[in-house]
Amino acid sequence: MEIRELITKPSSVQRKALLNKEVSAVELTEAVYSQVENVDGQIGAYNSLTKEFALETAKKVDEKLQKGEDIPPLAGIPLALKDNINLKSYPTTASSKILENFISPYDATVTKKLKSNLIPIIGKANLDEFAMGSSNENSAFKIVRNPWNLKKVPGGSSGGSAAAVAAGEATIALGSDTGGSIRLPASYCGLVGLKPTYGRVSRYGLIAFASSLDQIGPITRNVEDAALLLNVISGYDEKDSTSLNQASSDFTKDLNNTLKGTKIGYIKELCSEGLSEDVSKYIQKSLEMYKSMGAEIVEISLPLIKYSIAVYYIVATAEASSNLARFDGVKYGYRTKNAENLYDMYVKTRAEGFGEEVKRRIMLGTYALSSGYYDAYYKKAQQLRRLIKNDFDNAFSKVDVLLSPTCPHTAFDIGSKVEDPLSMYLTDIATITANLAGIPAMNIPLGLDKDKMPVGLQLQANCLNENKLLNVAFKLEEVVQFNYSIPSMTLV
Ligand code: GLN
């Protein structure tokens, strides 16, 4: 296989080529960098490249292969790292002016794990500033374009991670998901994206947005790669106080189990009104496919979903306002050049350093937490969050997996929602409840709509049931046979 084609394949194909010595890890990495050179001017997936590190890692893989030593399952497989995750000695900007010149003084726990698994990190992937957004238009540096159609958004906030994988600028990627930021871009770019159970993956070294919701997870070309990458990044970490003390598990082990007797609940509130015609058609088709595989299909009602956007945008902004207090021009990054006194320095640094959406959220969050409004907003939102979690507990006493679209529609045009934050927030209707409830959830592609844009299916399972979730996704993937080859325009 030509190397230009090889870089568009999932890891299993690339690994075989590495093990058979058809290609070296250095050659594979270099081929990905030439793809970056060819297409990233149009796509904008990367904020910065980490070439020296990637090639050093690839060289280590080649040395091992030459000596006939075993290599870890994802060794030598090029990865895009979202630019809110620390990689020591390289910039971590969160796509914010306030961190534009910040160099990571340490590795995130997930980064350490990538390193010990000899995974070459190609670069730091663009995102919405501080992961706040659904379209990647909130980056302080540049927008990201969807490789399937350059006029469309790639989804956010992990838009760079997803676009990189879709455009052959990486084989696998890490994103972070606070309310859908892995699943939405995966859906818009025709990829698999998994938000693990809260606490499954360490948040140490991830720039915090809303700490009770944030999780790091994989964006990949198929389900097997998502399972393999979850194997690498998951596990207990004493550096993260919310890390779950779970024995490590092999997330590939249940792939391909039969679905006979598996109960799949479609979420009534997300599968009926407000869907585009094509999304609705594909959802119906997926239900039929599951039925023919022997799964039992049940209707599940989650009536509190109608409050979820309101609840999320109170909880997330409240936590963000507190987390972002640390960016004050003293400890990290940008400091204003023209301050008269200390107070002035704080105010100007933050006024100049943060973008509009981030400021909007800090204001909303500070308001929701203020003593006069705390009971009316923050406390109410937390109470509703508990009720939403109860609804899920109830649903999972009846079914194994919940099914819905990841988004009611496919990727939208760049610029079409940016002036109207509320309509942007509405794109998160199907994804944010999983973060509020802490459960694992993923996107898998179903096919293309009439405009040739990918349609995504969301599957959700109860806490710590990633094995089951991945298997249910895997079985559908086999039948759907979505074409993962990168959109042809990017091969120029
Ligand atoms: N779109 C949501 C938001 O803007 C989710 C973001 C995320 O998951 N990081 O908050």
Image (spheres, grey):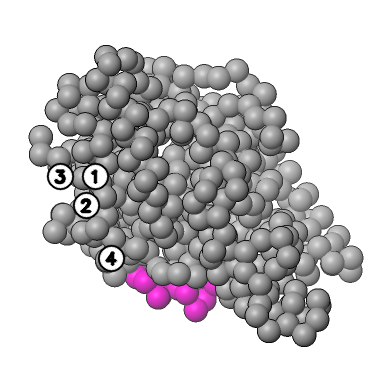
Confirm or deny contact between disc 2 and disc 1 (CB under 8 A).
yes
> Of marks 3 and 1, which one's residue comes earlier in the chain?
3
Q: Which mark is residue 30?
A: 1
**Cα distance in 3D space between marks 4 and 3:** 18 Å
- Residue under label 2: 34
- Residue 60: tell me if it is visible: yes
The boundaries of the magenta stretch are 413-423
Is-magenta flag for residue 421?
yes
Secondary element at image label 3: helix
Q: Which mark is residue 41?
A: 4
Say above or below: 146 vs 454: below
Identify the image quadrant of the C terminus.
bottom left
- Give the residue type at disc 4: Gly
Q: Would you say the beta carbon of the disc 3 residue lies within 8 angstroms of ligand 1?
A: no
- Give the residue type at disc 2: Ser
Say above or below: 266 vs 341: above
Secondary element at image label 1: helix
The residue positioned farthest toward the right in the image shown: 371
Residue drawn at the location 46% of the way across and 19% of the way down: 250
